[in-house]
Image (cartoon, rainbow, N blue to C red):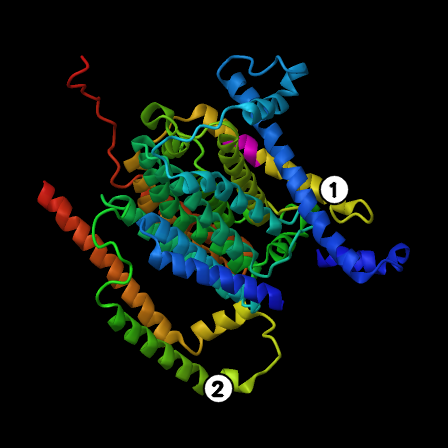
Amino acid sequence: MEQLYQLLRSCSWFAKVPDCVLFWVSVAVPIGLVLAVYPAIFAYTTLIERKALGRIQNRLGPNRVGRWGILQPLADGAKLLTKEDIVPRAADGFVHWLAPVIAVIPSILLFAVIPVGSGLIPVNLNIGVLFVFAISTASVLALFMGGWASRNKFSLLGAMRAVAQVVSYEVPMVLAAVVVVMAAGSLSTTAIAQAQGGGLLNITNWFVFRPWGFVGFVLFVIGAMAESARTPFDIPEAESEIIAGYHTEYSGFKFALFQLGEYLAALAMAGITATMFLGGYNGPGNDLKYIGWLVGAFWFFAKLMSIIFVIIWIRGTWPRIRVDQLLGFAWKVLLPMSIVNVLAAALYHFINPKPLAWVVTAVLLFIAWLVLTKVGAPQQIEKRVYRYAD
Amino acid sequence: MNYAFWIISAITLLGAFLAVTLRNLVHCVLSLILFFLGVAAHYFLLRADFLGAVQILIYIGAVAVLILFAIMLTRNVTGTEGPREVFGMKWWSGGVIAAAVAAFVLQAIKADSVTAATSTTQANSSVAEIGKALVADWVVPFEAMAVLLTAALIGAVVIALEEVMRRR
């Protein structure tokens, strides 16, 4: 934002334009871009998701609206806009109305600190990572408000599950991000992305190629999926158990807003993951002279979409896990693993020939993983006995 | 900047007022969240980015959500039962305590050397400064807090464990 202002100011064409106009333009352009680009990506992500799920489930997916269903998102939007908006009689009207709005706002705010290219960031906060976590916890409020205000037992159950899940997965996720902050020495997302530049083809310095970075990446993606309630962590809206969870009583565009908020949060988390572990905009050719920023933006969006695709892939192929498994997994596996990971990152920093540090931390993390997942687990799964079904 | 201060203050006070006057407990907590958000906005206005983000993370993300979680599981949240008037019989005792606390805080602010200095310079990197202060000058209180929190955590586990044992 400031950079855009400086750029406009220094440009001789705009020398006559008053300062405040330039200021508001440099404020409005990033906001406009965020509001235009990411919802567009959201619309086509739904199409990609339906197509990919269709492929996984051996069917075609949407193919009627336009070629390859390319206009399907527009048709969906028109349908949801014209649908009747039903509010249950017993519902708490104001909170019921407010919940979908609250669901969207934090997700959009998250994009403010995601650097798309070198210097291409809407707001360069020096507490970027902390801002992300602060804002993303606020999204749980929307789930709670929606579930509670509907006065529906299934909605309330969904809201309860959502709160328990988000609170539990928050902790390992923050600890997974701590290693990146330790390595980059800054909470700013731009500084983190810069710290991963250089090396061979601008690739080898990505944090994901360090042992702690890889573990942190996996932990962070799991946490992000749980936080945005994606399958296999979608128990807050498990259709087969509690209808649609907290948005059971929503229809029309309010339902669409919930979907929008959820997908935007997933997109933002994928963007943050790409920035923190996959090098953000760093990639072959992002330091070229005039088109470098374009190449960087290309790499950033390519990484973002790859993460989104992996999340869709996981959704298509993995079953949903149970509530107790979900919470046990967060507290008994992810949390100790993330603490060991913080230790490993510190060791990596202090052991000096870096290949040695690489091996030592990799062995440490591998042992921790073995202890956490294999020790104490039953050697072979017993045959299930069905008491009533036979 | 000044307009922002007044608008944010009005919203903050509105949140605080609604939190104590509304009948429905969930509405009260939601207005309390509005109040927390207003305080965070004040921190941002004062250029204390770190404090503002932590305010949102801790008070809205953790404290308010836990309060909501506890309230959600109780039966009577609509406030249709119980005493109707907000100003109960003992309103004056609350007033005395509030006045005492306000006087004490005012005294502390007046006596504080930071406000007396009225420096207009801004800390260049508040996060790094806070981090260094926590692990260098204030490391003993910091560790004491850590021990306290760990003790609380273990206590919670022990309480939960007893219940599990009894159920078996």
Asked whether residue A15 is in view, the answer is: yes
On the rendered image, what quadrant is the N terminus of chain A found in? Answer: bottom right
Q: Describe the element under mark 2 as helix, strand or loop.
A: helix
Circle 2 residue: B113
Q: Which of label 1 and label 2 is nearer to you?
A: 2
Residue at 48% of width from left, 28% of height from top?
A85
Give amino acid for label 2: Ser
- For the residues tagged 1 and 2, is the chain the same? no
Any magenta on residue A310? Answer: yes
Residue B139 position, x and y percent, is 39, 74
Q: Nearer the viewer, residue A149 or A288?
A: A149
Mark 1 touching mark 2, by CB under 8 A? no
Residue indicated by mark 1:
A295
The picture quadrant where one finds residue A155 is: top left
In 3D space, how far apart are the residues under numbered discs 1 and 2 (Cα atoms)? 52 Å
Residue A153, position as x, y percentages in the image: 29, 32
Quadrant where the image shows the C terminus of chain A? top left
Q: Is residue B115 left or right of residue B64?
A: right
Report crowding for label 2: few under 14, some 14 to 19, many 20 or more residues within 10 A (C-alpha).
Answer: few
* Residue A374, percent from left and from top: 31, 39
- By secondary structure, the bulk of the magenta-drawn segment is best described as helix
> Which residue is pictured at 44% across the width and 49% down the height?
A137
**How many circles with numbers are drawn on the protein?**
2
Front residue (pair A257, A383) = A257
Magenta region: A307-311
